[in-house]
Image (cartoon, rainbow, N blue to C red):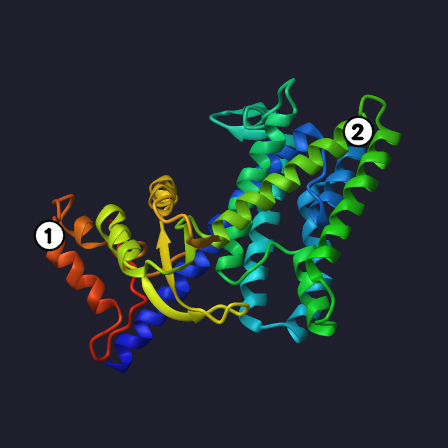
Amino acid sequence: MVSLDKNKKLSKLIINYLIVFISSAVAGLAVFIFILPNRFAPGGLTGIAAAIYYINPNINPGWLVLGMNIPLLVVAFFKLNRGYVYKSILAIATSSVMLILLNELVSHPVYYAGYYSEGNWLYGLRYTTDQNILPAIAGGVFRGIAMGVLIKMGASNGGSEIVGGLVNKRWPHLNVARIILAVDISVILSTAFIVSGNLADVNPIDVIVLSIINMVTSTIVCNTILQGFNSAMKFEIITKHEDALAKDLIMDLGRSVTKIKARGGYTGEEKTMLICIIKNKQIAGFNAILKKYPDTFAYMVSTKEVYGRGFSIPSAKEENFGTAIIKTEAAAAEDINNLNEPKKGETTNEQELD
């Protein structure tokens, strides 16, 4: 039994590190394919490396990223969680080596099939277009996916993320997100004016706009992955018609509710608060039900991730692959009566899916 548990832990660890490896490779590819050919900066140490590469293409940006991250990793090794550091080492090494190899293959002849090639086949991977906003968005999407997965795996791709972790460790009261944002914006602005000052065909405004689009896109995608796709709306309803309203929600939307006794702070009047979580597609139906009770007070809160039956656990309908479940009026009334009388060991918080 102990051996089985160890094998499961080892398998999970290997899978986690494999996911970190793949995500980091995607991040490196995104920089090579979308960012470097279009000469804008993604922020952080990668942005600094890109700026130096734009000025002197003979310098491999992969070596720069790796070299600048090593001091941060050394400090992080003694200050931060070791598991986080080990995974970050793998992530940084993978993305850096990816950049090193791809740029070396592009820059130097490659012996293949009996002759030397100048690596032109790799230039086809580099995405360039007159509409520079497209590679900025595409690069942001792929880097955002990579960053979101890395953070979920307890790793980072280095640079400002490690700096943020070290700052948070030393000064936990500071707003790390703002510090990282300030660092990234500083890198973007510096890159724009340094590169445009050395390359006549580069417009600093283009660099700034494309870099910001890339950064915003990657942030949105990263946050979406972290917060999850199983979003819903939570409604809290103060009403005198708790039984009728609960019945409508159960019959029309297939949603259960939780009842909580409430008292008005001004009037002292006893009322009931209903809590109900519904999917976004049910909002219109929910509003139609509320219109039947004009003296009802309700507000909604967006939820990013929901766990439980009807959301992360299939409902009875889903388990029967769409088989219709028809509740009679009496059955629905019995459900409503039972809302205030949960069985022993059960709660009334369960939210059912239609």
Task: Specify the amino acid type for callout 1.
Answer: Thr
**240 or 307: which is nearer to us?**
240
**102 or 177: which is nearer to us?**
177
Q: Is residue 65 visible?
A: yes
Question: Which residue is at the far top?
Answer: 130
On screen, residue 266 above or below 256? below
**Spot occupied by residue 152 in the image (x, y as percentages of width and height):** 49, 58
* Nearest to viewer (mark 2 / mark 1): 1
Where does label 2 land, which residue? 205
**Spot occupied by residue 164 in the image (x, y as percentages of width and height):** 69, 62
- Report whether 213 appears left or right of 84: right
Local SS, label 2? helix
Going from N to C along the chain, the mark reached first, 2 or 1, is 2
- Report whether 228 appears left or right of 42: left
Q: Is residue 57 visible?
A: no
Q: Residues within 10 Å of mark 1 (few under 14, many from 20)?
A: few
Where does label 1 land, which residue? 328
- Report whether 207 appears left or right of 146: right
Q: Residue at x 73, y 67 (%)?
A: 167
Q: Residue at x 58, y 73 (%)?
A: 81
**Spot occupied by residue 67 in the image (x, y as percentages of width and height):** 72, 54
Local SS, label 1? loop
